[in-house]
Image (cartoon, grey):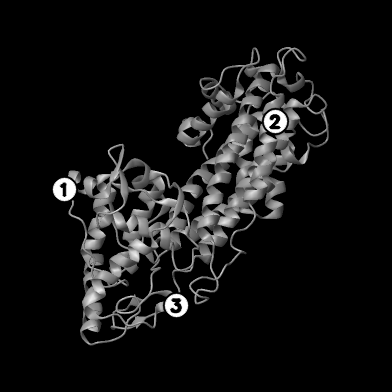
Amino acid sequence: MIVLTGHSLTIAEARRVIYDREPVAAALESMEAVRKSRAAVEQAIASGRTIYGVNTGFGKLADVRIDGSDLEQLQINLLRSHACAVGEPFAEEVVRAMLLLRANALLKGYSGIRPVVIERLLAFLNSGIHPIVPQQGSLGASGDLAPLAHLALALVGEGEVMYQGQRMPAIQALSQAGIPPLSLKEKEGLVLINGTQAMTAMGVIAYLEAEQLAYDSEWIAALTIEALYGVIDAFDARIHEARGFLEQAEVAERLRRYLDGSQLITRQGERRVQDAYSIRCIPQVHGASLRALRYVKETLEIEMNAATDNPLIFADGAVLSGGNFHGQPVAIAMDLLKIAVAELANMSERRIERLVNPQLSEGLPPFLSPEPGLQSGAMIMQYVAASLVSENKTLAHPASVDSIPSSANQEDHVSMGTTAARHAYLIVQNVRKVLAIELICALQAVEERGIDQLAPSTSQLYHQARRIVPSIVADRVFSRDIEAVDAWLKQQAIRDRLAGGASV
């Protein structure tokens, strides 16, 4: 059971809720803060104060005063008008993260909603009711308005959801689950959509998969190093201590552990003095990506526990309008993640080229073909890797440097953070496929060298991977192999693959 406080949710805990379906509850003391915040809103309404989004219009219409008899209708109108996102729906994992993060943010007690709103979000999460939320349409600055409106509509029994494996009207799922539809009170519609939970949820999913890929890229590279008689001296601890980047030193250390006991690695001067950069500079490049990913994780965990709606209600009764819904911190982090992960594929594709190119492969068969000429072997797999790497370069263009004013120029700078997060996830998917291709090629190459000469750790990994993809004994439809390895890499963490071997 994960207990949410609004202040302490970690990515590790989020992972358990998102993927393992661990139940979630709200901390009692946090719910008490929520009640106090709601009381402050009700007191302010009773006193006749003008409060943005409670008794006013929204955006450029903030100066339009709303009659007291229409305040609840104002909130449902807001959800209906803002639920205009388009495109393919977010995956269920992303929607689960959105529900989790929105509930956690509201538990900080700055939003002025009733506890029942949080209880309903958690009921959806624990019951497996996942609103259909189209991916496109958020500017990422007044919050993720359009996507979150689709999420919120399901709470009131409108829109569609996935429940028990079926897509159905939200009201039908609520009836089957025994959950009454929510009736919104003042401010609650605005609270539900005025946050960064779509971009942050997508960011968390992208980060989790990117972190796993960063570790996978190392042991896959280790197999390639063995296949190419790589020079181990480049990973000597003294080199990396001399520069001082912790992540670089950690990558070099893991490579040394993976390669410990290998009969295929060489020393400088034995076959060559030094390797090409895609081999020799793995610690420097992969380490830089890991360093960036750690910044991304820090940013996401701050935002996961942030109050991101507007206005905020404080313990002294102050109702303050600000801009915590602006997604710029997450947008920049997602753009950085894109660059960091894309570089893993850039390096991997160059190693693939060295494995298949007979001018670079230290005597391996051309294109790792069993019968060069008659059979093409891995020739076109390198083409696919190059195509994916090129696509990543387009996707890696920073979204956060763009801005288009909205709401009659009231909202004149936006973050495009949700676009950044979506593109980051697409890059992660491409990178995994490139690494899958490198692994297929590396497995074939080390067979040519002699698997009895592998290091104990890489030997263990070789045999596990061979359960997924067989040796190339004749040309076949290699897309099936790539997809199979891609799925395997996505499903199992390196720690599971290397149980009892070199730890990461």
Name the secondary structure under disc 1.
loop
Kindly identify the residue that appears in the image at 48 percent across and 67 percent down. Answer: 141
For label 1, count other residues whose C-alpha is less than 10 Å away and answer few (under 14), some (14-19) or many (20+). few
**Label 2 or label 3, whichever comes before in sequence order:** 3
Residue 389 in the image: x percent, y percent? 67, 41
Q: Amino acid at mark 2?
A: Gln
Residue that badge 3 annotates: 60
First reached walking from the N terminus: tag 2 or tag 1? 1
* Numbered disc total: 3
Circle 3 SS class: helix
124 or 232: nearer the viewer: 124
Decide if residue 111 is in sight here. yes
Q: Position of residue 318 (x, y in %)?
A: 32, 83
Looking at the rendered structure, the kind of residue marked 3 is: Lys
What residue is disc 2 on? 382
Name the residue located 65 percent from the left edge and 43 percent from the top edge.
Answer: 391
Instruction: Identify residue for label 1.
Output: 178
Is 216 situated left or right of 191 in this image?
right
Q: Which mark is residue 208?
A: none
Q: Helix, strand or loop at disc 2?
A: helix
Which of disc 3 and disc 1 is earlier in sequence? 3
Query: Pointers 1 and 3 in contact (CB under 8 A)?
Result: no
